[in-house]
Amino acid sequence: MLNNNKVVAMILAGGKGTRLEALTKKTAKPAVSFAAKYRIIDFPLSNCANSGINVVGVLTQYESTELDSYIGNGEKWGLNGVHCLMNTLAPRQTEEGANWYKGTADAITQNIDFLDNANPEFVVILSGDHIYKTSYADMIHLHETSKADVTISVIEVDPKEASRFGIMAVDKNDNIVEFQEKPKVPKSNLASMGVYVFTWKTLRKYLKHDAKDEKSEHDFGKNIIPLMLKDKCKLKAYRFKGYWRDVGTLASLHEANMDIALDKMELNLYEQDLNNRIYTQDTYSVPQYIGKQGHITRSIANQGAIVLGDVDSCVISTGVTIESTCKLTRCVVMENAHIKKGARIHNAIIAPGVVVEGDAKINVGSDEVVLIA
Amino acid sequence: MRRVIGICDLHNEPSLSGLTDKRPLGAVTFLGRYGLIDFALSNFSNSHIDRVYVLVKKGIVALRRHVGSGSIWTNNTRLGYVELVINEKGLRHPAFNTDINNIKYNVPVDELDFEYAVIAPSYFLSSMDFRPIVEKHIASGADISSVYIHVDNADKDYLRADKYKISDNKIIKSSPNLLRSKEADISLDTYILSKKALKKIVSDGTKVSELFSIKDMINYYIEEEILDVHPIEFKGYVVPILNLRNYVDHSFDLLNYHIRSQLFLEDWPIYTTTHNTPPALYGKDADVQNSFVANGAIIKGKVHNSIISRDVVVEKGADIKNCIIFTQTQVGKDTKLEYVLADKNASIKEVKKISGTPEDIVYIKVGVKV
C-alpha cells in the first residue's frame, strides 16, 4: 500500500469511442458495460483503489453525464473515505476562456489546479477503457527507486502485431531509448499500454511548455514523451505481465467478453482475495433464474437475468430475459435486453434494452461480430 | 413520511432449527441473496419511513454484518438511519429481554419527533406499502391498528400465528392458529400506533407483566377491551416463515414465476447488502434447470430445482436436486445431493451421496466438512 496522497491518478475518460458504433451514441466509452455486471471504467478505478491511491481525477468530455453520475463520489470503489478525493473533471470555462480538451496532455494541463491542490509527488496517467487487473504500487516503486522522470507500462506483443501499437525500444536496463508510433519496422515488441507514472514537478514543466507550443497536438504519446526523450530525461519501461486488453472496437470488446465467459481465467474475476476484486455498482434484483427448459453452458450471467432458452458461450447482463426456444451462441447480451421466443443469434453484441423479435435469425454461421442496437 | 418511525421487531422470531442457532432469523439467507430482514427494511424504505430502529434480541454481530451502516435502505443518509439496538441488560436476564424493555432502554420515544410508529417483524415477507396503511389507521381514529391477511389455507400454514376474530371493524379476539379451519384472518404482527399508544404499551408493560412483548400487550388490550385495535386487511402476497418447513417450502415455491411475481413487484425493489461478487460462471458441462443462482457462484455440474447462493462452487459431475445451498459452500466432484439444505461455508466432498426427502430435508451445519 502506498502512502496517502503521495500519488494522484488521472484517468482519461473523454474519448468518444467511435469504433464502438451505436454503443457509444449516448454513452462515453468507459461507461460501456462489460462482463455482465461491470462497466469498463470499473477496472482502472478498482485498480486505483486496490493500489491504495486515494485521489483520483476522471477526465470526462464526450457524453459525460451518464459517466459522471456513475462515478459519483467514488463510493462504489470505496474512494469516498476520509483521505480520499474523487472528482470528475470535465472541460470548464475559466478566466482564460473556454476550451474542449484538445488532447490527452491538454486534458491534464487544464486541470493543473486540481493537481496543485493535491500536491502529489507522482501522477499516474491511466486510460479509462482498458481491461486489466493490477496494483500500480510496483510500477510506482520502480519509478521512485530508479529516479525516473516518467515510467511507462509496456506489454510484450506478438512481433507481427507490433506495428499496430506505440512501440518502446529499450536498453539492457529497460531504459527507454526510442519511441515509435505505429512503426512499419518495429524496434522491439514492447507496446505502450498508455499507463504512465510521472514525477509531478517534471510533468508540470513539460505541460506548461507544451501548452505554449502551437504546433503540438497536446498528446502524451505524440508530443510529451518524444520531447522528454529528446531532452534526455530518464524514461523507464515497466514490464506488465498478465491480462490486458484495449476494448476500443466491437471485435475486441466481444473477444474480451468471451475470454471471461469461456473461463480463460487470465483476468481472474473470481479471486477470493477481497483486496483484489473489481468493484462496481450492484443492482437490487432477484438472483438469476434458469428456467425448466433453460440450458446455459460456458457463460457468465448476472443477477436479475432470466434464461429460459439455450445459451452457450455468452455474457448475460442484469435484467436480460432470454425466452424459451432461443438459441444464443457467442453473444454479449447487455443489460435489460429482451430476446423473444425462437430467436437464433450468433457472434453478436446486443446493446442495452434492445428487444429482439421472436424467431429472428441473426448472424448465424458468421465469424464477424455484429452489433444489434 | 417525516411523522412516522419504523420499528423492526426481532424479539419474537420463531426458530428455524439449525438456521437460527447462531443467527437471528432476520439474518438468515433467502433465495441465495437476501437476508430475511431485507423485506421489512425495504418496505420501510420504499414507504419513505427513513428512521428505523431494529430491535435485536440476540446475534447482533451476524445482523450488523448484514445490515452494515443501513445506508442502502436509507433515503437521506443525514436525516435517516437504520439503527440496530440491543437491550444489554436483557442479555444478562434473558427472560426479561423483551422488545418493550429494548424500546424502553434504547429508543428515545419522548424526545423523538414523530406521531406514528409502524412495527413490523422479519418473518412475514411481503411487498407492503405502509403509506396507505398509516392513512387508514389515522382515518379510523383507533389507538392501534393491526395488519392482517385473510387466508384460505390456515389449516395447513400459519401454525401458531395469531388468528383474529373481527367484528364491527374491531378485533375482538386473538388466539393461536391451530390449523383447525381453512379460512382465517391471520395477524401479520404489523402494527401502526400513535406515539401516545406506544408510550402506553411501554409503561403498561412493566405494570402488567415484565415478560410481555408488544404483541402480548396488544392481545391483552384486545382481551381486556382496554384499547380499540383496528384491523387493516393486507391484500398482497405474504410468505410466512414461521418454521423450517415454511422456509424450505416457500423457497422452492418461489422458483415458480407466477408466485415470485406476486412477492417481488416491479416498482418495489427489495434492497440487500451486496458483496462485489462477479457474475455467476457456468462451465461447459453445466446443466442448470429451474434454479436460482446468485453471483459469484461457479457451476460446473448439474443443478436442478435448487437455490444456489453467492460464491458457491459446484464441481464437475456433482448432481444437485431440490437443494438449498448457502454462501461459499462447496460441492465436490461427483457428489450427489437431494433435498439437502447446506448452511454457509460447508464443504461436501468426501461423502458422495446425501439424500433427504421432501418432508425431511437434510440440514448440514455452518462450516462442516462431510
Image (cartoon, rainbow, N blue to C red):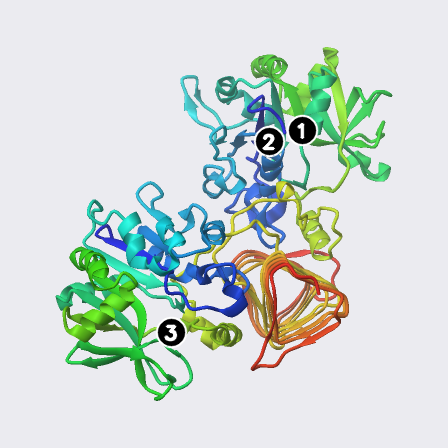
- Residue named by callout 3: B237
Query: Which quadrant of the figure contains the C terminus of chain B?
Result: bottom right
- Residue named by callout 2: A52
Give x and y (percent) for residue A98.
Answer: 44, 24
Give A292 or A12, whichever is nearer the viewer: A292
| Distance in Å between CA atoms under marks 1 and 3 | 53 Å
Position of A18 with respect to B34 (left or right) is right
- Per the image, label 2 sits on a secondary structure element best described as loop
Looking at the image, do the residues carrying marks 2 and 3 touch, with CB atoms under 8 Å apart? no
Q: Is residue A98 above or below residue A29?
A: above
Q: Are marks 2 and 3 on the same chain?
A: no
- Per the image, label 3 sits on a secondary structure element best described as loop
**Identity of the residue furthest to the bottom in this view:** B181
Query: In which chain is the residue bearing label 2?
Result: A
Give x and y (percent) for residue B259.
Answer: 46, 76
| Distance in Å between CA atoms under marks 1 and 2 | 8 Å
- Residue named by callout 1: A137
Give the amino acid type for the residue marked by disc 3 in the picture.
Tyr
Looking at the image, do the residues carrying marks 1 and 2 touch, with CB atoms under 8 Å apart? yes
